[in-house]
Image (cartoon, rainbow, N blue to C red):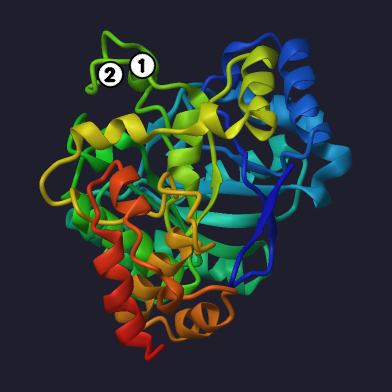
Amino acid sequence: MEYRIHQKTGDKISIIGLGTGPVFDMQEREAVRTLSYAFENGINYIDFATAGAETFRYAGEAFASVRKELLYQVHFGANYETGEYGWTTDLETVRRQIDWQLKELKTDYIDYGFIHCLDAKSDWKDYQENGILEYLQEMKAAGVVKHIGLSSHTPALARLVLDTGIVDQLMFSINPAYDYQHGDYARGSASERMELYRRCEAEGIGISVMKPYSGGQLLNKDTSPFGQALTTCQCIQYALDKPGVLTVLPGVRSLEDVKEILGFLDAPESEKDYSVIGTFTPKDVSGACVYCNHCQPCPAGLNIGLINKYYDLAVIGDTLAADHYEKLEKTASDCISCGHCDRRCPFHVGQSERMKKIAGYFGK
């Protein structure tokens, strides 16, 4: 397993996590076996915005003895009183649900307590006025919640909540379909969405990725907006390449699903290459570096993706980006303008000219 370190919390987070949405639908023995297998193979980050209540009991059985080695996302606003997922901003319901979830999970603390699924200003207003935000903050002050997170599909609303400074982790839907304006949750322009990812990186806010396959649509050529199916490896790599992303949380419904997503770790680079989507990019993305490094290898040895990333972050005020740039073995000033990257870039970025601009910005 590969891990990324959360800039704010210091947590070591597996790049492959678990989305537990379909887990409730398994038989208990199968579910416990599946969850245990995930842990045994290095997955340490689990999201509990699940579709059914049974998931919590299954996870309690599978993880109780190794709880301290795992990181849980628990959502303040997810309601399972009917046995199925529901959404609520009623304070007493949220209190009952958190107590119940802790009991079922056999734990007395939550690593990341989430402001749950806010997509409109009215949701955020209700969340505050009904006392749920205050309750979440009280739980943090008491040490029951270690860190506060936010789940949203809407860049504008995410920015509004991030402005409060209370959020350490953002759960956001990242995939090529949504980023390129296809699907029900394709909210915000491609550039607006990328600006959100860059902001998270610059401010040390980690991103955990939900819906990496666009609800499965990207895995089927008949439903993919690109007219051809992408693979799980391509979708996972796409999300991991975005600034701020620490972990990707595919939903799993069987042991085979877990084995498939773990296969990403040993897959050759050719199977992770998602450059085909470059032929479908919207106008406001074409010509913009997305840090995919499909232009590699650089004859001069430059890490073109990282150079672009540190430049973009420095421009928006990330004070650490310039330091990271200076520590690169090769910087933009080492570009020999051979045009190799220009010819290979699937997103039509004029990297040779961009290297001159970046070298000028950093003064070397």
Q: The N terminus appears in which quarter of the rendering? A: top right
The residue under the point 62% across, 45% down is: 15
Identity of the residue furthest to the left in this view: 283
Q: Which structural element holds mark 2?
A: loop
Confirm or deny contact between disc 2 and disc 1 (CB under 8 A): yes
Q: Is residue 316 visible in this depiction of the protein?
A: no
Q: Position of residue 330 (x, y in %)?
A: 54, 73
Q: Which residue is mark 1?
A: 229
Q: Nearer the viewer, residue 228 or 84?
A: 228
| Quadrant of the image occupied by residue 312 | bottom left
| N-terminal-most mark, 2 or 1 | 2
Q: Is residue 211 above or below residue 312?
A: above
The residue under the point 26% across, 37% down is: 278
Q: Residues within 10 Å of mark 2 (few under 14, many from 20)?
A: some
Identity of the residue furthest to the bottom in this view: 363
Q: Which residue is mark 2?
A: 224
Q: Nearer the viewer, residue 41 or 233?
A: 233
With 122 as the anchor, is 224 left or right in this view? Answer: right
Q: Amino acid at mark 1?
A: Ala
With 75 as the anchor, is 176 left or right in this view? Answer: left
Q: Residues within 10 Å of mark 1 (few under 14, many from 20)?
A: some
The residue under the point 50% across, 62% down is: 303
Q: Which structural element holds mark 1?
A: loop
